[in-house]
Amino acid sequence: MEIKNYDFTGKKAIVRVDFNVPIQEGKITDDTRIRGAVPTLKLILDKGGALIIMSHMGKPKGKKKPELSLGQITGAVANALGVKEVKFAADCANADAEVAALKPGEVLLLENLRYYPEEEGKPVGIEKEDPAYEAAKKEMKAKQKEFAKKLASYADCYVMDAFGTAHRKHASTAVIADYFSANDKMLGLLMEKEVAAVDAVLGNIKRPFVAIMGGSKVSSKIGIIENLLGKCDKLILCGGMTYTFAKAHGGEIGNSIVEMDKLDVALGVEALAKKNGVELVLGSDCTATDGLDFGTMTVKPGSKIITCPANQVPAGFEGVDAGPASQKDFAEAIKGAKTILWNGPAGVFECDDFTAGSRAIGEAIAEATKNGAFSLIGGGDSVACVNKFGLADKVSYISTGGGALLEAIEGKVLPGVAAIKGE
């Protein structure tokens, strides 16, 4: 069922959102996730429905931690929705009274789902090596189903609008869908956009398709890289993983980050790219320093910053950004693209001295988007880059999902989507 076609009149809708917002001293420092859910929530209210909102916050691991209570954001949610009040149920598993009193146009927010170990469905206080683990796991899975069934009992329909947790088979993101008919469960507007954006990149590709993968480790992105090598025309690899590739060919990388046990993986990526006819673009030079303070993200006084070949980093120096030649190569590779995916920065962009590589990529993507390309930016660091450089409104789509987006790119079926679509 598509949410725009559903009749919410007089019905109670339970909606899984991602209100895992950062809070300091009781105040929300970034309400992006709340604002992202507003269109879906308002649509339900405008169509005559009553809202039951559920989310997690942080990682309480099955314990009630006041600093992670969703009760502290009811005012912010009310302001975002333009309603007088957002009611609060302090116990997810026993909210029958609050739900029964809920009228059309009213909003009820349930307490942090992860206060309950049944939400994630993982045994608590027992290690996988323990002989009793499998029995405990089976017992917890049964409890997870009961918890999901209880949540489902509160409402007439279910809406999944939390893309950031769609890769988790939790009680509220997937299991709950089993207790609703196909006509009474649906994706929210934000989820629809996310799924469409991923499909535009991986399912309905307009060529040339250029993918940019950054970050520190090739090992954390290998599944994604391998999947992309079967789909893209050009693959730019940048960031810390650059030096694992350089080392695999016998290069000198100084103190640069490297995965010595993944040198064969790097060579395998190069071989697969060649086999598939994909142009692999690796940075030829880099910016390196002998004094980056990762704690303060500043260069220590008296330290040196140099430009050198990526495979000739001097002893005592560390590669921290793409060099000028690499920046030009990246921009040239992106030029003329019709589909673009960017995940991971080209360097330590958090330090203002080392933003040039990531900025060059971001600006090239913005220019290609202006010329008709569809560009998808995903992953916390890449999103932070486009925001830092003022490019957020110059790309096609910025994904709210980190792990979920990566798993979708890797070709995995997301439980939160499959549960709605019946896949």
Image: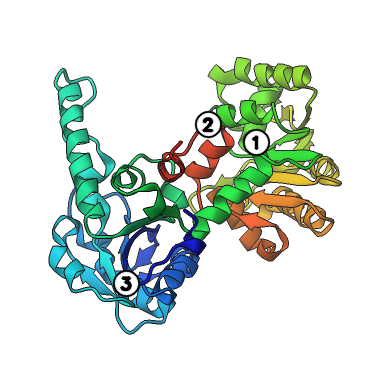
Q: Nearer the viewer, mark 1 or mark 2?
A: 2
In the rendered view, how is the structure colored?
Answer: rainbow
Q: Which residue is mark 2?
A: 220
Q: Which residue is mark 1?
A: 317
Mark 1 or mark 3: name the one nearer the start of the chain.
Answer: 3
Q: Is residue 346 visible?
A: no
The one of 277 and 310 positioned closer to us in this rendering: 277
Mark 1: which secondary structure? loop
The one of 337 and 423 positioned closer to us in this rendering: 423
Where residue 175 sits, quadrant-wise, is top left
The crowd level at tag 3 (other Cα within 10 Å; few <14, some 14-19, many 20+) is some
User: Mark 1 and mark 3: span between their CA atoms?
Assistant: 66 Å
Question: Does residue 204 appear to the left or right of 381 in the view shown?
Answer: right
Q: Nearer the viewer, mark 1 or mark 3?
A: 3
Mark 2: which secondary structure? helix
Residue 154 percent across, percent down from the top left: 23, 59
> Where residue 10 is drawn, which disc sits there?
3
